[in-house]
């Protein structure tokens, strides 16, 4: 592959093209375990520039990996075939905030928290918010179909995408969707692009639905001696028709990690549930909170604290918000890897699944935290291991295989909100072989030269652990 | 095209295959203006039968038009190329009601109202409900991305599809989606199938999200002298962050039609707005209703009546529910045609659009009612004309062209909830030429022999009025 840097310079200007080794190294990984060097980084600012880059890459058959913040956990932004990394962070304009039409129009590089800060004066918010909202871009969130802590009530990114402008592999610009809450005008291509992980097109503009900020939010925390009781409480809350705006689980490993990292002094119990309700009328919020409290108590939840106050709420939520970052502090010499990190399991199986995860981890000599947005079926785990030891990676490999076989056997899915990328591809392909030819056919129809984020998802290598180098000092 | 009836008899049994002229005639039209005769009707009962039919049709390149209730308004189920009509109404089993996982699994022929009746004992409901819910099937609703009166709060069918089993053109069965609120495991193909109007595959099973029935529903009716005031009230209700569970408009033509048909004695004012709020706490419902009432009053709404009582609510809603059926009674000798029937316009343009619709109708010598789920941007219209007169069809053609040019110029879409089919295809293709090659590429990837509902949507003829015969006694 021969990339004409001068050509790229002419499109975006020299200062927005880099072949500097330090830059390439930064762009060689994301939040996953993977590492692969690109040949060049290019930072377009306009749709026209993206179109010209795509036309060039398509003609020369150069792989292009679109990239937002690089906060993806499964290798979406790791350029496994080298080539060009298309950094979209310069396309970070909020083009329109329309309270009249209850929507925003944004460029793909807009950061989630920045968008929400801009919406605040209008009393509006954009509900999907991954834990990485401080850095994650809307384009990246669309590509992964991100959801986050409020998905139990508000749904995932796919539920907020109204429209989109997308540059196809051949450089053509298409305009998808509508400016309305509903539409039935042709294939819902904007929803096909959601979760397609940069393999079908480059999102250059998105029209997203927004929501009024509720006047009242009440957050509560319940403690449990047994993880299983907490899991059953979550299932009961959902199946009883309660309407939480957040319903989070955190196991004992998570609690210890947060205490070690932040010195929060949380009680080191078996599990914690965080539950929130929101609304414009306090009586209605009280009603939901009371119902959830009583379900928690039925399942031996205790020490339940709650608050409507924003500062108090942030304190209660503090541990959960920092959980992912804290996990690396769980134990000396152990790192936290983003592997098997976000399975989706049916609501009725939450308790069983959390128990099973701990069992599988123990059997295979790794530590796994269990936490996440269990109210919407999302169970987060991280595999904590000694990354310098080859044997620990073998252990992780076994855990992942066993865990996904279990998750699929109970009607769950490989990924609930982070995507498949590289590391989850083998497990997902094993579970869903019927989808592979269909996805390949669609990919080929839209990207016949296979230049857009090639060798991801259905085309990812079958051995995740050796698919790329790992970004750890270990030779496998 | 040579169809081997014996072959079909062997797949589904003789009594489920028909070439009887009376049957073929019934299946030659749906709720649209179109009419085209199929060669044979086949009524499968199992997925395996559907797979065998598809394999046969694909091998012999025989057009297949999947059909639910035939209540579509744009010609989706009209077999423009003849061939086989695949009647899915025998596949009408509710396979699973799971309050534990807040989902149902249904076959495509399950009728919407039947599903909701089955959910009632559980205190649950399936929110998307077109006006035709008494006959419309879930499979058809998915194919059209139907929404209905509660879409303003609850969204469209696309927001409720969790998973799906689909038989592809080649007879392969694929299993899409998840049993969870969110998922990010491969392309969201289940959402691509939504709204694809039977052109990409045959839905043989669907997993749909369900919701708890709220304890309280309060419905209110406000009258307005001017349609424009009513339109502005709707825009204000939405942009003020109110959360109606229904927000409907009905213009003076609709009111007269309902009075003529049902003798309801509604006051013949310029417009009526119906607004509803729901929830588990009465104070919260009161809050929303009060807010909407005051916005209506600000825009000169008067005579506001409201009720929490189910019988009273049905009475208030009676006129709206029967509006579509009543429109044919508006005036002697005039029929109501499903043309330009469901544009989607941005919330801020509701008042302007309703006014414009009446202007365009008047200018072109037809009568158009304006009503619909305006809270979610859906404006329903029907064109009422003397169907025996050739010139009236020319008038309709002009109206449609002018109307859609206007709708697209204000950022609206051709169809909000009924789909494109045949009659809306020319307008939609004119507005969205960029989508046609992409949709064709996807169609070709999934249905290379073009057997599934061919010549609809992006492949529909450019002249809707002569695309098929019309189901009226007129020669154009």
Image (cartoon, coloured by chain):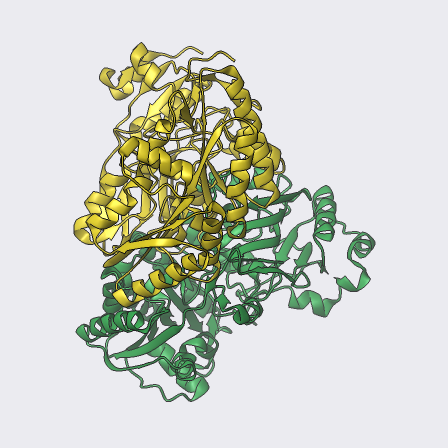
Chain colours: A green, B yellow
Residue found at x 39% / y 66%: A380
Work out whether residue A152 or residue A201 is closer to the camera in this orientation and state it.
Answer: A152
Q: Quadrant of residue A366?
A: bottom left
Residue B214 appears anywhere in the view: no
Residue found at x 80% / y 55%: A5
Residue A107 appears anywhere in the view: yes
Residue found at x 37% / y 71%: A368
The location of residue B312, given as percent across then percent down, is 22, 49
Image mark count = 0
Query: Does residue B27 sit above or below A109 in this rendering?
Result: above
Location of the N terminus of chain B (image quadrant): top left
The location of residue A322, given as percent across then percent down, is 46, 78
Work out whether residue A173 or residue B313 is closer to the camera in this orientation and state it.
Answer: B313
Position of B42 with respect to A66 (left or right) is: left
Query: Does residue B70 sit above or below B246 in this rendering?
Result: above
Query: Does residue A284 sit above or below A465 in this rendering?
Result: below
Work out whether residue B68 or residue B179 is closer to the camera in this orientation and state it.
Answer: B68
Q: Quadrant of residue B91?
A: top left
Query: Does residue A128 sit above or below B374 in this rendering?
Result: below
Q: Quadrant of residue B193?
A: top left
Work out whether residue B199 or residue A22 is closer to the camera in this orientation and state it.
Answer: B199
């Amino acid at each position: 592959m021969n990339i004409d840097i001068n050509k790229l310079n002419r499109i975006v200007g020299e200062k927005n093209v880099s072949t500097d080794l330090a830059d390439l190294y930064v762009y060689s990984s994301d939040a996953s375990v993977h590492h692969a060097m690109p040949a060049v980084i290019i930072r377009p600012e306009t749709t026209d520039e993206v179109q010209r880059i795509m036309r060039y890459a398509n003609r020369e058959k150069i792989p292009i990996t679109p990239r937002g913040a690089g906060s993806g956990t499964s290798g979406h932004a790791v350029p496994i075939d080298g080539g060009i990394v298309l950094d979209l962070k310069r396309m970070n304009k909020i083009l329109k905030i329309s309270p009249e039409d209850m929507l925003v129009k944004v460029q793909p590089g807009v950061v989630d928290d920045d968008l929400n800060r801009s919406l605040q004066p209008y009393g509006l918010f954009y509900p999907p918010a991954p834990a990485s909202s401080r850095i994650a871009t809307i384009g990246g969130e669309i590509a992964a179909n991100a959801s986050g802590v409020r998905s139990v009530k508000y749904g995932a990114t796919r539920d907020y995408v109204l429209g989109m402008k997308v540059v196809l592999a051949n450089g053509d610009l298409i305009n998808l969707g509508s400016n309305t809450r509903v539409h039935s005008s042709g294939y819902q291509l904007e929803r096909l692009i959601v979760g397609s992980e940069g393999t079908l097109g480059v999102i250059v503009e998105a029209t997203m639905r927004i929501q009024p900020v509720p006047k009242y939010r009440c957050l509560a925390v319940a403690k449990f001696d047994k993880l299983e009781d907490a899991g059953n409480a979550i299932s009961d809350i959902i199946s009883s028709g309660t309407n939480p705006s957040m319903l989070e689980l955190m196991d004992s490993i998570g609690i210890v990690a947060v205490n070690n990292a932040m010195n929060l002094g949380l009680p080191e119990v078996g599990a914690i549930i965080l539950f929130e309700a929101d609304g414009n009328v306090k009586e209605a919020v009280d009603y939901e909170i009371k119902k959830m409290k009583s379900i928690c108590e039925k399942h031996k939840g205790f020490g339940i604290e709650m608050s409507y106050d924003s500062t108090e709420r942030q304190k209660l939520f503090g541990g959960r918000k920092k959980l992912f970052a804290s996990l690396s502090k769980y134990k000396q010499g152990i790192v936290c890897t983003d592997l098997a990190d976000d399975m989706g399991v049916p609501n009725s199986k939450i308790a069983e699944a959390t128990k099973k995860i701990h069992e599988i981890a123990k059997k295979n000599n790794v530590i796994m935290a269990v936490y996440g947005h269990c109210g919407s079926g999302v169970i987060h785990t991280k595999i904590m291991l000694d990354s310098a030891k080859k044997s620990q990676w073998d252990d992780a490999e076994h855990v992942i295989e066993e865990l996904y076989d279990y998750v699929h056997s109970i009607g769950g899915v490989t990924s609930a909100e982070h995507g498949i990328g590289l590391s989850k591809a083998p497990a997902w392909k094993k579970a869903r072989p019927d989808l592979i030819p269909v996805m390949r056919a669609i990919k080929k129809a839209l990207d016949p030269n296979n230049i857009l984020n090639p060798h991801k998802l259905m085309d990812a290598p079958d051995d995740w652990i050796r698919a790329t180098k790992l970004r750890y000092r270990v030779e496998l």
